[in-house]
Amino acid sequence: MKIIRVGIIGQGRSGRDIHGAYLTTDPKRFKIVAAVDLLEERRKWAAAAYHCDVYADYRDLFPRRDIDLIVNATPSCRHAPVTIAALNAGFHTLCEKPMAATVKDVDRMIAASKKARRILAIYQQARYAPYFQQVRKVINSGVLGRIVQISVAFNGFSRRWDWQTLQAWNGGSLLNTGPHPLDQALQLFGDGRPEVRCFMDRANTFGDAEDHVKLILSGKGHPLIDLEVSSCCLFPDFTYNVYGTRGGMKGTQASMEWQYFKPGEAPRQKLIVTPLNSASGSPSYCSETLKWHKGQWPEQAPASADGKRYTASKPSLSMSVVFYTMLYKTLTRGAPLEITPQQIRRQIAVIEECHRQNPQIYGKKKRP
């Protein structure tokens, strides 16, 4: 089995606690051979934890020929320039989310990938979240009928004062947390460009970017998508709420339930335009009894690509397993990426439009 040698640029929360944490658990397929961070204490930690070379400047990786994949886990504002530099240097590159802040930068990244003939992957691992896979499974089964609306809420209550609250660093809720639910929402929306209506606010943040987002995606022949990403929702009660013509589905990242009726089991009805009366002759309202069929998830801990089982309450490991399994097949067998830069381009186009629609927050030129 070929071992993919990896260089990680950035040893913050993503580089260390997501990519580094997973890659060290899969030594048969991946080996961290280099790590980069501006902070000396993080370099020392990486050298001890990974037993690899460490650098302060990511460009020091480029002369090396023993690296198969570079993971760009730098701050969001560095995703486009560092990814382009790594591709130009001849390395397959995995870029953390958000891919970029503008479609223009996305196109530059895709162009660099094509010119260098190197793979450009984006770490949108929430596409493989067990709860989202269950939502897709139930919707695709057709038991809920035509899907009228899908409400998605990645909400909570928090105050933040770090770099991810700053526009200059490509911060804000939509670029920080938003790429996960928005990627899922666009998959459920289907092909095509949605109509976008977005409302933003700065509520609890100490920075100049938004921390409350209400986003509506619509289009003829598509379900209405109602997406919230808010840091001022103290009582979040669902992640997904699906409205269908035969039933519905609601739940969190830990559990889901759904109900539906079967048309063949439902009472036959027809439109009546005359006043309705009960059996006693008094005015009445439409009323019928439907037989509801129920489902719930998880029935047991969901299995991941490596055959192991992980609890629904801790999906992060299973998402990494599935994502890196997919990427490994692309790097070693030439299998197509399941999550492509072109797909993420549509996501960034939506985010850019949301920023345009909210000049009260994004109307001024960003500080360099």
Image (tube, grey):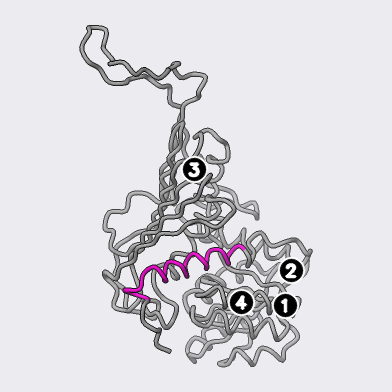
What residue is disc 4 on?
Answer: 71
Chain part drawn in magenta: 343-362
Q: Mark yes or no: residue 354 visible.
A: yes
Q: Earlier in the sequence, mark 2 or mark 3?
A: 3
**Please, what is the three-letter code of the amino acid marked with disc 3?**
Pro
Element marked by disc 1: loop
What residue is disc 1 on?
Answer: 68
**Please, what is the three-letter code of the amino acid marked with disc 1?**
Asp
Residue 266 or 301: which is nearer the viewer? Answer: 266
Give x and y (percent) for residue 173: 39, 68
Gap in Å between the C-alphas at discs 4 and 3? 32 Å
Gap in Å between the C-alphas at discs 1 and 4? 10 Å
For this view, does 223 lie left or right of residue 160?
Answer: right
What residue is disc 3 on?
Answer: 298
Give x and y (percent) for residue 292: 43, 26
Q: Earlier in the sequence, mark 1 or mark 3?
A: 1
Q: Residues within 10 Å of mark 2 (few under 14, many from 20)?
A: some
Gap in Å between the C-alphas at discs 2 and 3? 32 Å
**Please, what is the three-letter code of the amino acid marked with disc 4?**
Val
